[in-house]
Amino acid sequence: MNTTDTKTAITPRRDQDFPEWYQQAIRAAELAEPSDVRGCMVIRPWGYGIWENMQRQLDAMFRATGHRNAYFPLFIPLSYFAKEAEHVEGFAKECAVVTHTRLEVDADGKMKPASPLTEPLVIRPTSETIIGASYARWVQSYRDLPVLINQWANVVRWEMRPRLFLRTTEFLWQEGHTVHETESEARAEAKLILDLYQRFVRDHLAVPVFSGEKSESERFPGAVQTLAIEAMVQDRRAIQAGTSHFLGQNFARASGIQFQNREGKQEFGWTTSWGMTTRLIGTLIMMHGDDDGIVLPPRIAPTQIVILPVATREESRTRIMEACDSLALQLRAKRFGDVPLEVEVDRRDIGGGVKNWEWIKKGVPVRIEIGPRDLEKNALVISRRDQPIKAKESMSIQEFIAAAPEILTSIQQNLLERATQFREANTRVIESKKDFYDFFTPKNLGKPELHGGFALAHWNGSREVEEQIKNDLKVTIRVVPLDDSSEPGKCIFTGEPSARRVVWAKSY
RNA sequence: CGGGCUGUGGCUCAGCUUGGUAGAGCGCCUGGUUCGGGACCAGGAGGCCGUGGGUUCAAAUCCCACCAGCCCGACCA
């Protein structure tokens, strides 16, 4: 690092050490912290506020498409879990299992599990099996279909390598589980949700994604088809932001979800499942954050506008506070999207500079300062988090109140545009194996620079090629796009025919 | 779960090679001076040096085990 660099709020910078920057940005924004339980985290109010906004908005979209919420147990009897072979195999290694109840104090004064359960309980890593058991009872006739249910819950997957938000042992998510009368209906449902997810992350999180189908090797255990959306974050790696599965009749068969069809015959239901997780928060951080901390899109920021009174002199203090409160009230009467503006007046008696920087690090979209000089002119000073920290603009209070929603919209759009440009700048159409390997090989092997991105390349559809590339470069197929925009061509690895280009990248 | 690195006050880290029971900067508290700003001055609080064992008259420092974090690998949202 050279000394002419301007000081950044987060050390190290993104270009110095991206993973460490990520950790520090989370800490500085007070989003979350590691807990004493390995792989688990405490989500602090600012981080949880983001999650609550995601929940609220996603939930409204689910409702609008006819889905309803319900809640199923955390514990899954081991016997339920064992019903779908592929599914068990896929999750067995990461299951946490409850084997005892009751604690007793032993001779050494230590607490000890006392009473073994007759049947061990698996803590849900996902709920297909236990929800299936209910569905088997609920579904009798084609008239009971479709079943369109979502649940908001926590799940546990005993991961080898946890990272805050991106991969924690316990995480929060929503899981939708539906049953349909026909295959095409269930496939349409999976696709409907994929599109809904894509819309959600674009419109609310300002995250552009590629969507499509997963290759066989990346498919959800037990699924017939796995659809996913994949975003590119600032270290140019791909991150899966949501998945939607068409499960065929596999789980219906395993759980006994049967109905009498229109011909009077017994038939297994066609099911889907789909989910989004707190990983989205990690995606947001890596997508929009800069060297001064995280940057929140207005639509999911717990506070969209923070008002900072510049109350330096005792005599003007009361008047300034009143002006700030009055501004807050007027702003809260305005709406942004479907809800009132979230506005906070930070009246803490601490240094103005410190206060300002705290909000910068938290990524609040708009900071407003009102001081004595502004008040004389009935004006305020506005700073936008998507602009350089020093960029400040003065405008009249009335003007700002009128313009606030548009300003937030403009920030929202700007973030999406910026992210889209970044992704485009790092997405390459690649025509040869050599170019492909060059693209994904860092120039500096000792301390690899940020490199690579998304490669759009033809592939013959074989698992062996995928395997080879993964071994050589740690690059995988993120998604096989569903749209028809790609021309057929030749696999760049084998020369064999390829129906279309697929998206390759290193991933989280 | 394998390999590497790391674990010292809230944060970032020095001290460890050459053992003698702790330091800096930032943050925190108090008072004052400041005040469109991550300010300054003075005083102050806060550490069983990751945990447990061992070697030693003496361990943050040496040895062993364990735990946790990060990076890499296998797995995954």
Image (tube, rainbow, N blue to C red):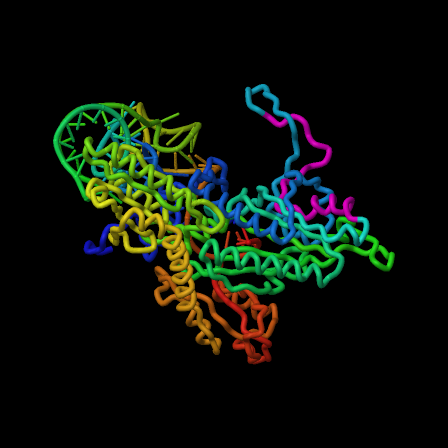
Classify residue A502 as left or right of residue A88: left
Asked if A222 appears above or below A117 in the picture, the reply is below
Classify residue A14 as left or right of residue A378: right
Answer with the quarter of the image where residue A437 lies: bottom left
Residue A10 is situated, as x and y percent measured from the top left of the image, at 31, 48
The residue sitting at 42% across, 70% down in the picture is A439
Answer with the quarter of the image where residue A321 lies: top left
Q: Is residue A129 magenta?
A: yes
Residue A6 is situated, as x and y percent measured from the top left of the image, at 22, 53
- Can residue A162 be spotted in the picture? no
- State which quarter of the image contains the N terminus of chain A: bottom left
Foreground of the two, A474 or A326? A326
Foreground of the two, A303 or A334? A334
Foreground of the two, A188 or A423? A188
Q: Is residue A70 magenta?
A: no
Residue A149 is situated, as x and y percent measured from the top left of the image, at 66, 48
Q: Residue furthest right?
A: A264
- Can residue A156 be spotted in the picture? yes
Residue A317 is situated, as x and y percent measured from the top left of the image, at 23, 33
The residue sitting at 65% across, 55% down in the picture is A221
Asked if A279 appears above or below A479 in the picture, the reply is above
Classify residue B48 as left or right of residue A159: left
Answer with the quarter of the image where residue A354 lies: top left
In the image, the segment drawn in magenta is A112-139
